[in-house]
Amino acid sequence: MTALFEGTLAEYRIFDIRILPTIDYESDLEWICKSFGFLEPRDKKKTAYRIFKEIVEAARDNKGLTSDELAQRLNLTRGTIIHHLNKMMKSGLVIHQEGQYKLRGRSLANTVEEIERDIHRVFENIHKVAETIDNTLGLFFRQEVPRRRGT
C-alpha cells in the first residue's frame, strides 16, 4: 500500500455568524473577516481586519499593496503583515501578484464567488472518493424518501 501525501492547496475556515441587522461598511467588512476566521478574540487591535480593509479599499482603484506599504500604513511590523497575508492567501481571498497583494477577484463579491466555486470542487472530489470507498466496501447510498404528511 502506497501512502500519498499532497501539500495543502488551500485552507478554508468558514464560520456561520449571524448577519448584523444594519448595513454598515466597516461592520460588514469585519463580519466577513470573522466569517473567514481572521478576526479572533485575541486579536484585540483587529490587525487582520485592518490589513484586509486596506486591500479591499486598494481594489477600488484596481491596485495592490506591498507588504512594506501595508506595514507603513498600519504601523505594524512586516512580519505581522506577512503572517496575516499568508492566511488570507491560503483562504483564497488575497493573491500575491507582481510583488503586490490584492483581492483575488475584481470585487469582494467576485472573490467570494470564486472561493465558493473552489469549495464546491473540493466537495465534488471528496464525494467521488467517498463513492469509490462505498463501492469497494459494498456500502450503498440510500436517498431518503420524503415522508407523506399524516404517516
Image (cartoon, grey):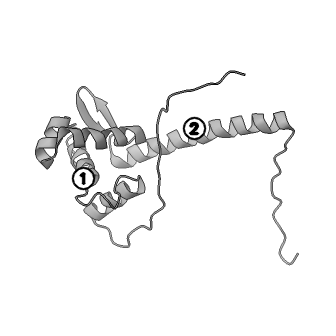
Amino acid on which the number 1 mark rests in the picture: Thr
Is the residue marked by circle 1 packed among few (<14), some (14-19), or many (20+) residues within 10 Å? some
Which residue shows up at 53% across the image and 42% down it?
119
In the rendering, at what x and y percent does residue 104 appear?
35, 38
In which quadrant of the rendered image does the N terminus lie? top right
Question: In terms of secondary structure, where does tag 2 sit?
Answer: helix
Quick check: 43 left or right of 133? left
Which residue shows up at 23% across the image and 42% down it?
81
Q: CA distance from mark 2 to mark 1?
A: 31 Å
Which residue shows up at 77% across the image and 36% down it?
133
In the rendering, at what x and y percent does residue 17 appear?
45, 64
In the rendering, at what x and y percent does residue 10 appear?
46, 37
The residue nearer to you, when weighing 112 against 49, is: 49
Question: In terms of secondary structure, where does tag 1 sit?
Answer: helix
Name, please, the residue furthest toward the top.
Answer: 2
Mark 2 or mark 1, which has the lower sequence index? 1
- Residue 105 appears in the figure: no
In which quadrant of the rendered image does the C terminus lie? bottom right
Q: Is residue 34 above or below residue 128?
A: below
Which residue shows up at 83% across the image and 33% down it?
136
Q: Which mark is residue 47?
A: 1
Residue pointed to by mark 2: 121
Snapshot quadrant of residue 131: top right
Amino acid on which the number 2 mark rests in the picture: Arg
Snapshot quadrant of residue 129: top right
In the rendering, at what x and y percent does residue 108 appear?
34, 48
Snapshot quadrant of residue 113: top left
